[in-house]
């Protein structure tokens, strides 16, 4: 079983890996996109959520901004797998895989490295975004370019906006 990681572990990871990010410890919980946006006085489009999926049993992370939903057909196509070989990780699986709870999941600094896809349809091209900070009362602020570098993620359109544009 993976050890449960904390905001302090996330800060230590950023220091060790040279990730330019800032942890915001808040007075309110931020388990949803609207809660997080309100807590740091930004728009939902500047809040990124980190979602764990399993493809053929292997974990991967999807980072998407705002409240758009990841479309399974688009994700399956991006991964080159059949839709039936893909599923959302349970909260318990996500905690075991990453060390962080759902609702506080950062886009990097996990218990083990994860292949990462960045949703091109929702993620801003530049500027600061806020992701999970390792606890429901913490958010990690990072520039989009640094997010891309720190995750090594590949940009691909995965959310509803991408599906509607097709």
Image (cartoon, helix red, strand yellow):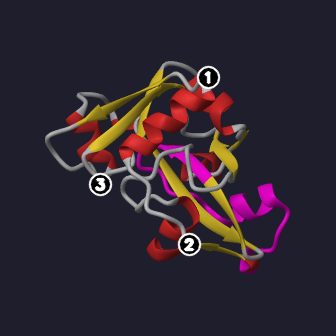
The residue beneath circle 1 is 145
Q: Are marks 2 and 3 in contact (CB under 8 Å)?
A: no
Left or right, 53 with reference to 64: right
Distance (Cα) linking label 1 and label 2: 27 Å
Picture layout, residue 121 above or below residue 81: above
Q: For mark 3, what is the residue?
A: 31
Bounds of the magenta span? Answer: 62-84
* Label ID, residue 105: none
Q: Local crowd at mark 1 within 10 Å, few (<14), some, or many (≥20)?
A: few
Q: CA distance from mark 1 to mark 3?
A: 24 Å
- Residue bearing the label numbered 2: 89
Which comes sooner in the sequence, label 2 or label 3? 3
x and y, in percent, of residue 75 in the image: 70, 59
Residue 73 lies in the magenta-colored region = yes
The local secondary structure at tag 2 comes to loop
Q: Quadrant of the N terminus?
A: bottom right
């Amino acid at each position: 079983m993976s050890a449960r990681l904390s905001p302090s572990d996330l800060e230590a990871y950023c220091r060790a890996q040279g990730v330019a990010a800032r942890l915001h410890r808040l007075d309110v919980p931020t388990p949803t996109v609207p809660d997080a946006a309100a807590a740091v006085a930004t728009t939902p489009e500047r809040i990124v959520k980190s979602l764990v999926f399993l493809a053929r049993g292997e974990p991967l992370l999807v980072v998407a901004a705002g409240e758009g939903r990841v479309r399974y057909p688009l994700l399956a196509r991006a991964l080159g797998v059949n839709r039936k070989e893909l599923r959302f990780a349970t909260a318990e699986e996500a905690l075991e895989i990453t060390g962080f709870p759902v609702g506080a999941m950062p886009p990097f600094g996990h218990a083990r490295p994860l292949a990462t896809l960045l949703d091109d349809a929702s993620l801003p091209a530049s500027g600061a975004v806020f992701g999970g900070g390792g606890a429901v009362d913490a958010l990690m602020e990072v520039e989009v370019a640094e997010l891309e570098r720190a995750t090594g993620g590949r940009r691909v359109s995965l959310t509803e906006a991408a599906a509607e544009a097709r």
